[in-house]
Amino acid sequence: MCLASHRSNMSDYDAIARFYDADHSGFADDLPFYRELARRTGGRVLDVMCGSGRLLVPLAQAGMRVTGIDASAAMIERARMRVAATGVAPRIALYHGDVRSAVPDGPYHLAIVALNSFMHLTTTADQLAVLANIHRALHPDGLLAIDVFNPHARNLAGCDGELALDRTFRTDDGAFVCKFVAQRADMAQQINYVTFVYDELDGNGSVRRTVHPMTLRWFYRYELEHLLERIGFVVEAIYGSYDLDPFVTGSDIMLTVARRRG
């Protein structure tokens, strides 16, 4: 089955916020990396496009002061509930807003754009606007970490537009959900058109379907370096994993650490 895809924007997570935490509940591979980076830099941390606050609480529990901002009101509300359930609320500030326009005032010693969030910025103008806002908010010599998908052949091989079962999980309220994904890659435009389909089964056996299209832009190494350098960052390191393996052709991710210049 082939699904048509459409352009999305960063607030579109409102439609799937109730599925997000359950869908990503088993993922914490990047947390040790960000926790160590935050300890190294000290000071305040800005989580750009923070979603439901997956990283906010553990970073605050590690002693950091953390600020999160996201364009999705529903995701920020879930982040507020997550924070309220912990004892670290005084260390966390949350904002609902579009990072293309502004980010909360700093200065911050570290900014994070985690788990492909930067790929939601599909135009050069948006990418530069967000990087400029982060640059202004960082302390002189502050660090920025950006984690994006590495578009090598193996990662793009499944982008044929066909719908496939991705996983099953239960939501917070106990509903059983089958998640399907279809991806179509436009190599010339560096765009991955993704459609998520969530089939939610209730106790009577009926199914409620939520279809969520998303548009993601992928980046090549020197393209991202060029964007960062245009704004005033100096790239310090590029890793191919959260364990700091070198970035190579077959790496699954491209994890870039850059320092604000001046």
Image (spheres, rainbow, N blue to C red):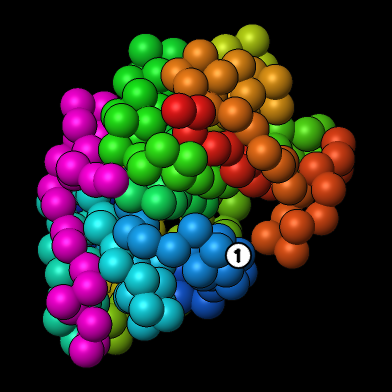
Q: Nearer the viewer, residue 144 or 164?
A: 144
**Location of residue 84 (image quadrant):** bottom left
Q: Is residue 197 above or below residue 125?
A: below
Q: Quadrant of the C terminus?
A: top left
Depicted 205 relative to depicted 220: above or below = below
Magenta part mainly helix, strand or loop?
loop
Q: Is residue 186 visible?
A: no
**Left or right, residue 67 beside residue 248:** left
Q: Which corner quadrant of the image does residue 237 belong to?
A: top right
Element at badge 1?
Answer: helix
> Is 251 or 88 nearer to us in this picture?
88
Q: Residue 87: within the magenta? A: yes
Picture residue at 80% right of the left edge, 43% below the top: 247
Q: Position of residue 208 (x, y in %)?
A: 26, 62
Residue drawn 20% across the image and 32% down it? 102
Q: Position of residue 116 (x, y in %)?
A: 51, 44
Q: Which residues are magenta?
A: 86-107
Q: Is residue 193 above or below residue 158?
A: above
Q: Position of residue 163 (x, y in %)?
A: 56, 45
Residue 88 located within the stretch drawn in magenta: yes
Query: Which residue appears at 29% of the width and 63% of the height?
Result: 66
Which of the 4 image quadrants contains residue 195? top left
In the figure, is residue 10 to the left or right of 233?
left
Horizontal and vertical percent position of residue 180? 50, 55
According to the picture, the residue beneath numbered tag 1 turns out to be 33
Quadrant (top left/top right/bottom left/bottom right) for the N terminus: top right
**Residue at point 35% right, 35% down?**
134
94 is higher (above) or lower (below) than 80? above
